[in-house]
Each structure stands twice: as C-alpha cells, then as structure tokens.
Amino acid sequence: MQAGSSAGDEAARSLQKAEDLRRRAKWHEERAASFALGRQGELVVAQALDALTSHGYRRIDDCRWPGRPQANIDHVLIGPAGLFVIDAKNWSGRVDVRAGVLRQNGYRRSREAEGAVAAAAAVAGLLPQRLPRVQAVLCLCGSAQLPPQTLTGGCCVATAGEIAAWIHRQPSVLPPESVSAIYAELGGRLQTASVTAARTASSIVPDFVPEHWPPGPVPREAPAPVRHDAAAGRGAHRRPRAQVPTRQAHRFSRRSAVIGRVLLLLMLLDAAGSALLSASQRIGDVIILVLCAAWLLRLERRRPVMDRPPRRIRNRR
C-alpha cells in the first residue's frame, strides 16, 4: 500500500463535493436574482396602482391562480372600469410590439400574453355573474417605452408609468356597490400565494438586487450532485456514467424514424399495386405486403418510445 493513499482519496472526494456545492450555490443565486427582480417589478406596479385607490378601485396582490396551485397572479384590480388581471414583467433589453405581437430583444413573448389572458379568465370564472369587462394586462417595469395597446389575443400591454392613467381613462361599467361586492367575493375565493407570513414575520428577500447576482433566466432544475463511492479504496473508482443523449441525437433518431415510415409506406403501396395489376405475381406481392405491414405496425408501436425526450442512460454492470 502506497503511503498517503487514503489521505489522497479523501482529499479528492472533498474537492469533488466542494465543486458540487459551488455549482448548486451558483444555481440558487441565479434563481434568487430572478425572483428578486420579479419582486421589484411587482412593487413598482403596486405603487403605480395605488393612485387608483382614490378613484374607487380595489386591489388584491399576490394571489393563487385558480386551478393552478403552483402559479400566482401578481395583481387583481376591481374598479368602475371592470376587472383587470395584471402581470408585472421586469424585463431588460428592447421591448416592442410588431403586428400585434409582443417581442423582447426580437423574441416573441406570446406565451406570456396568453398566460395573462388565461389567468383573467380563471379569475372571472370564480364570480357567479358575468362582468361587462375582464381585461388581462402585461405591465412592463423595465426601461421599455410603449404606449398602452392591445395585442393579438386580447391582452393589453402598458408600462408602469402609464398604466394608472390608462385604466382611469377607460369607460365606467360597474357601479360602486358592484365593485365592493366583487372585491369581497374575490377576496374570499382567491388564496394568497405568499407563504412568508406563515413562516416568519418579515420577508428575507431584499428590496434590491445585489450587483454580483447575475441576470438571466432561471434554470428549470438544480444540477444534481455527483454521488461519491465511499467504499472505494486504494485508488479504485466507479466506472464513468454514459453520456446523456443530446437533443441533436434525439432529433436525428426521430428523423430516421420518419424516413423509415415513409419508405415502408411506399413499399406497401407498390406491393398493393402490383398485387392488383399482375395476377402472376400475386403470391409474392402478398408476402411483401404482409411483411411491410408487420414492420410498419411494429414501428408504430415503438413510436411513443421514440417521441419521448431522451432519458439518462444508466450504467449496467
């Protein structure tokens, strides 16, 4: 046994664990930065909507999306102009509208607009009566300078600096007593999305975003820690895991499956035509027809397996 072998193994395992912890810490910092930016946007929009309180508007902040327990709605505003479901977006970069489609840095943001419309419909579905106006609004809190306008699909977009004046200019459709009744009804049905009050008296999320927090989208799931073999000794290591199939390889396999189905279908049609036109070759063509149909059926049965996203390939010993 070589001197220092066990100490070297422990050092290697500790260094690998430290690297795993650094990777997970970076993921959580990016996630915290994204949610902190979102909280900033919600606070800016709430402050802008406070100007409507004196005009008979009532507001519910940070509530659960009805029917979707994991999603939340930033602001629900009820007033003389109707019901407004507002989603605050603290986006960076260039934001504009082209042909009724909202874009950020050239990329379409139709999914966000469709989500706001779906949220407005879900909130309106909680009321026993049908309201004369239910409006979904995307409120931009960043540096975007857009006039209030309606997108394709019915969602409106406005900036935080103009949303209050834009809503105040809308025609009145609800009397004050209806506004109070709808506010009381929704207040009893909409559940708060915040769990901070149940855990602690004050929020630990800062009102600012530290400069060292990197901007950008939140990864969907944290990187999995690398498992270490505690029983490995004398320099023995586990066999490395196989690499995860890439999206390019997955697309290539699906493309190959489509080409195979087309070729088999052409052979099937050729065999069927030959069997109908030539009586002398009927027996051979029927055999080809049956074989092609069997292969096509087998390929179609395997189709759900090919259409699923690639999974990790487990190492088999």
Image (cartoon, grey):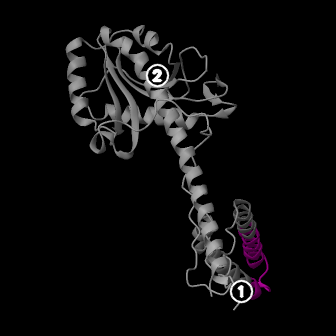
Q: Report the amino acid beneath label 2.
A: Val
Residue 311 visible, this angle: no
The quadrant holding residue 294 is: bottom right
Q: Residues within 10 Å of mark 1 (few under 14, many from 20)?
A: few
Side (left or right) of 36 relative to 72? right
x, y percentage for residue 189? 24, 36
x, y percentage for residue 22? 60, 56
Name the image quarter holding the C terminus: bottom right
Question: In terms of depth relative to the viewer, which is nearer, 220 or 101?
Answer: 220
Question: In terms of depth relative to the viewer, which is nearer, 123 or 41?
Answer: 41
Relative to 226, is 87 above or below? Answer: above
The Cα–Cα distance between marks 2 and 1, rounded to whole angstroms, is: 73 Å
What residue appears at the point 31 percent right and 15 percent down from the top-left corner? 57
Name the image quarter holding the N terminus: bottom right
Disc with the residue nearer the chain's start (2 vs 1): 2
Q: Which mark is residue 311?
A: none
Query: Which of the two discs, 2 and 1, sits closer to the camera?
Result: 2
Residue assigned mark 1: 287
Q: Residues within 10 Å of mark 2 (few under 14, many from 20)?
A: some
Q: Please state the extent of the stretch shown in magenta in the rendering.
A: 261-285
Side (left or right) of 236 relative to 176? right
Q: Is residue 264 magenta?
A: yes
Side (left or right) of 125 relative to 240? left
Side (left or right) of 55 relative to 154? left
x, y percentage for residue 18? 60, 62
Residue assigned mark 2: 44
> Which residue extends farthest front?
3
Question: In terms of depth relative to the viewer, which is nearer, 54 or 115?
Answer: 54
Q: Report the amino acid beneath label 1.
A: Ile
Relative to 207, is 305 above or below? Answer: below
Secondary structure under tag 1 reads helix
